[in-house]
């Protein structure tokens, strides 16, 4: 699942190209583009189920993109909290109500989520149940379900992007990259990132090997010192015992003095 996160952390322009496929806003909206710290997420027991990846501000939109690994039973509540925090952040920074940016939460779900139908892209806003009139355009939730993505392309750039995010096949990624210049940039960045990670992994493995060899050699050295000390003490005891025997001391006394057994002393005679 970390592959989803990697592919979505590759450059703000590539992200902008993806957002153009999701959001119904003009291209010049992205003339201003800012990456914002993703501090709307609160640490909780749900951390293993999702990754809040990026938050981007365009001219008139605040957008956060979340990649969800497993289905969450409280996804609706959590998205509402995110959107609320995004609005709160703007007002806390002195933005007037009349100048509030539109707040959009884009959820890329690896597992099935809210709907039983086959559509992989859903757009939710605040609308009247009766006549479908919109209350405000300030809040929007876009749900993208990767498991519902059809195997065959539907001739949309959004399908290409989601297939790129979803696949682990190098051949498929290269094919999709050839169809879209921005995906191509993302794919090249991903290859560079993977190469860097491989180098870091190799360096880490070498360091672990060296540390392990040093630990083994140190253990052998200490063991050798201990064995040397023990051998030296034993040789000294034998020397004392031999001298004591020549002087006529009894075996019991010699054993008490040297620590050798009576059998060991008998062999010295």
Image (cartoon, rainbow, N blue to C red):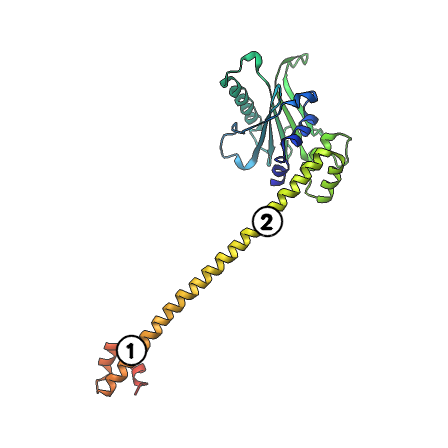
Q: Which mark is residue 237?
A: 1
Q: Which mark is residue 199?
A: 2
Where residue 68 sits in the image (x, y, percent)? 60, 34
Q: Nearer the viewer, residue 31 or 75?
A: 31
Q: Quadrant of the C terminus?
A: bottom left
100 on left or right of 240: right
Vertical side of 98 occupied by 194: above or below? below
Vertical side of 25 occupied by 151: above or below? below
Q: Quadrant of the N terminus?
A: top right
Give the quarter of the image for residue 18.
top right
Label 2 environment density (alpha carbons within 10 Å; few <14, some 14–19, many ≥20): few
Q: Is residue 163 among what the camera can see?
A: no
Q: Residue furthest front?
A: 31
Q: Nearer the viewer, residue 167 or 193?
A: 193
Q: Residue at x 64, y 25 (%)?
A: 142
Q: Residue at x 49, y 18 (%)?
A: 92
22 on left or right of 213: right
Give the quarter of the image for residue 84.
top right
Q: Which mark is residue 249?
A: none
Where residue 227 sits in the image (x, y, percent)? 38, 70
* Element class at badge 1: helix
Vertical side of 60 occupied by 50: above or below? below
Q: Is residue 158 among what the camera can see?
A: yes
Q: Who comes first in sequence, dot 1 or dot 2?
A: 2
Q: Residue at x 53, y 24 (%)?
A: 81
Distance (Cα) linking label 1 and label 2: 57 Å
């Amino acid at each position: 699942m970390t592959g989803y996160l990697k592919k979505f952390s590759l450059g703000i322009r590539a992200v902008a190209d993806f957002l153009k496929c999701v959001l119904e806003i003009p291209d010049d909206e992205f003339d201003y583009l800012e990456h914002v710290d993703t501090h709307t997420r609160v640490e909780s027991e749900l951390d293993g189920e999702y990754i809040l990846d990026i938050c981007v501000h365009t001219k008139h939109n605040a957008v956060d993109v979340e990649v969800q690994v497993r289905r969450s039973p409280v996804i609706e509540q959590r998205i509402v909290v995110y959107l609320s925090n995004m609005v709160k952040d703007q007002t806390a920074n002195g933005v007037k109500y009349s100048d509030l940016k539109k707040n959009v939460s884009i959820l890329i779900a690896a597992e099935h989520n809210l709907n039983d139908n086959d559509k992989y892209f859903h757009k939710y806003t605040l609308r009247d149940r009766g006549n479908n009139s919109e209350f405000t355009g300030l809040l929007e939730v876009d749900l993208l379900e990767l498991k519902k993505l059809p195997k065959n392309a539907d001739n949309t750039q959004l399908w290409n992007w989601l297939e790129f995010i979803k696949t682990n096949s190098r051949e498929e990624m290269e094919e999709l990259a050839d169809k879209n210049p921005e995906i191509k940039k993302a794919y090249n960045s991903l290859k560079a990132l993977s190469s860097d990670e491989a180098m870091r992994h190799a360096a880490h493995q070498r360091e672990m090997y060296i540390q392990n060899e040093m630990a083994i050699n140190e253990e052998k050295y200490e063991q050798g010192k201990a064995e040397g000390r023990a051998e030296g003490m034993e040789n000294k005891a034998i020397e004392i015992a031999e001298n004591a025997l020549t002087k006529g001391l009894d075996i019991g006394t010699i054993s008490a003095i040297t620590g050798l057994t009576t059998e060991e002393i008998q062999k010295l005679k």
